[in-house]
Image (cartoon, helix red, strand yellow):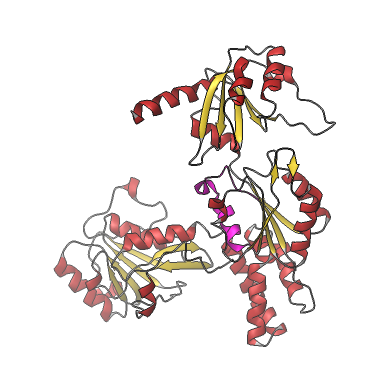
């Protein structure tokens, strides 16, 4: 799926719009193209690697000596340990040179141009006919970022930022489009109508299915779209937003957020995460606080279905991971039952993020050979937790939704055999700027919670490894002093 990237990802000076385009990126077919690399050092190897997995005919000359075998790519052609002659350059499309001798560069450049080749001299734009852009290679889709040779590191960094929001399966989408191109042209002869068709195809479930490798389903969806009377179908992505730090969003979560038409989000999703979404997306808040649901679960699911059936790309954004105490499984079942295309994007769950931020290893060879994620809020009328199993030694407990029942939980664990001296930690607003960590003992957990005046989302950790957080707090205090 190819999208226009939000300006927030690529900050550019406003004055840039008034300036003329300084470089033009042309797409050169590589089938049967002759590419010549001259040089044996790392700069030449970098150019060589660009073409190893292409259909080009690749020749490599290393007059300054070949690199060690351990540094040479396994699929590289055997280097020719001499300077190329005019016959070697005949028919070359592109010639890359990475040599130190300025006179030799000038001579070889003239030979290459006489043979009809375009020449690139590494790190010497004044001697080059073109510069090598920073490339994102998705097989059928190749994207280049160029700065005219003035700032190649900047081009590389911009490439990395773009690459982060492109699906790994983008080539599947382009490949399917190529296979169906003639069929679409036959069925939709009008140019503008055909353009609208491809826009729908690349922004809907067909592209998601193709990117996920579900080619047969994607093909069926694209062919369905060819029927002009067919209603446009939406899609739902159930997405884990992580613990709150927007930098802990997965690349896939960020991509679908920037594609969304509608975002249905919870209370635990902070503004810092929502700001990464497409600016014109509709946002619907269905937040839940402890014991108080602003929108009942069945109505949330009905809302997701209605928005998808209206043809929208819906993101159901949930704190942490949707499948860890997030009711994501229920929503997945509801979408499938309604016949709505649905995908799940995992998130960094709160237990992992809060523990890491507080310096609590959930497992440790000396202190914890097991970890259990458990909720203190059982379903009304449901089965209570197996406290005997949870109270075992050398075992870390990460307790979700445990603040209101901290004293009761501690009592049940101690009654089941867990020592009152067991270390505990409370992590509030884990991974966020206002994170707070409190430490104590299991027999004082209730009092610790009562005195903490907690207002943000908090996790409780019980086990020997919780003591690591107290040690980290001491280090932080020492550093601050």
Query: Which of the 4 quarters of the picture holds residue 108?
Result: bottom left
Q: Position of residue 348 (x, y in %)?
A: 58, 42
Highlighted magenta segment, given as a residue range: 239-260
Task: Look at 62% across and 15% down and name the residue there.
Answer: 443
Q: In the rendered image of this protein, does residue 221 appear above or below residue 435?
A: below
Say which of 14 and 51 sits in front.
14
Q: Verify whether residue 251 appears in magenta.
A: yes
Task: Look at 48% across and 59% down and name the residue there.
Answer: 163
Task: Look at 71% across and 29% down and name the residue there.
Answer: 376
Residue 178 visible, this orientation: yes
Task: Look at 26% across and 60% down and name the residue there.
Answer: 39
Query: Which of the 4 quarters of the picture holds residue 56?
Result: bottom left
330 left or right, relative to 50: right
Total marks placed: 0
Q: Position of residue 284 (x, y in %)?
A: 68, 57
Say which of 92 and 455 sits in front.
455
Query: Which of the 4 quarters of the picture holds residue 189?
Result: bottom right
């Amino acid at each position: 799926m190819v999208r226009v990237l939000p300006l927030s990802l690529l900050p550019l000076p406003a004055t840039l719009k008034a300036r003329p385009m300084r470089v033009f990126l042309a797409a050169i077919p590589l089938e049967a193209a002759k590419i010549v690399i001259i040089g044996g050092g790392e700069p030449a190897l970098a150019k060589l690697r660009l073409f190893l997995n292409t259909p080009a005919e690749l020749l490599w000359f290393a007059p300054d000596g070949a690199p060690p075998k351990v540094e040479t790519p396994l699929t590289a052609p055997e280097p020719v340990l001499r300077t190329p002659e005019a016959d070697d350059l005949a028919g070359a499309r592109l010639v890359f040179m990475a040599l130190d001798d300025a006179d030799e560069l000038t001579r070889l450049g003239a030979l290459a141009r006489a043979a009809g080749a375009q020449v690139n001299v590494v790190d010497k734009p004044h001697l080059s006919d073109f510069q090598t852009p920073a490339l994102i290679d998705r097989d059928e889709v190749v994207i280049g970022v160029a700065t005219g040779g003035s700032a190649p590191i900047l081009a590389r960094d911009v490439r990395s930022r773009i690459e982060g929001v492109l699906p790994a399966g983008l080539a599947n989408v382009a490949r399917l489009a190529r296979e169906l191109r003639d069929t679409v042209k036959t069925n939709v002869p009008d140019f503008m109508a055909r353009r609208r068709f491809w826009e729908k195809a690349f922004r809907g479930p067909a592209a998601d299915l193709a990117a996920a490798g579900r080619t047969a389903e994607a093909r069926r969806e694209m062919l369905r779209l060819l029927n002009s009377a067919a209603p446009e179908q939406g899609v739902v992505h159930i997405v884990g937003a992580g613990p709150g730090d927007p930098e802990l969003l997965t690349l896939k979560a960020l991509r679908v957020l920037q594609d969304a038409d509608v975002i249905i989000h919870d209370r635990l999703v902070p503004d810092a995460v929502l700001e990464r979404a497409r600016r014109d997306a509709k946002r619907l808040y269905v937040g839940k606080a402890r014991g108080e649901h602003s929108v009942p679960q069945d109505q949330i699911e009905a809302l997701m279905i209605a928005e998808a059936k209206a043809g929208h790309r819906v993101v159901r954004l949930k704190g942490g991971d949707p499948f860890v105490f997030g009711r994501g499984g229920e929503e997945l079942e509801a979408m499938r039952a309604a016949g709505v295309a649905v995908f799940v994007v995992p998130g960094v769950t709160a237990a992992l993020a809060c523990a890491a931020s507080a310096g609590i290893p959930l497992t440790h060879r000396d202190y914890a050979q097991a970890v259990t994620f458990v909720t203190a809020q059982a379903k009304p009328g449901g089965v209570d937790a197996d406290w005997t199993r949870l109270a075992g030694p050398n075992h870390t407990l990460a307790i979700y939704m445990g603040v209101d029942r901290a004293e009761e939980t501690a009592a049940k664990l101690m009654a089941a055999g867990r020592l009152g001296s067991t270390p505990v930690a409370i992590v509030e607003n884990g991974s966020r700027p206002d994170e707070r960590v409190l430490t104590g003992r299991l027999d004082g957990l209730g009092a610790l919670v009562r005195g903490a005046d907690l207002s943000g989302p908090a996790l409780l950790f019980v086990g020997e490894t919780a003591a690591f957080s107290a040690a980290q707090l001491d280090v932080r205090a020492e550093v601050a002093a």
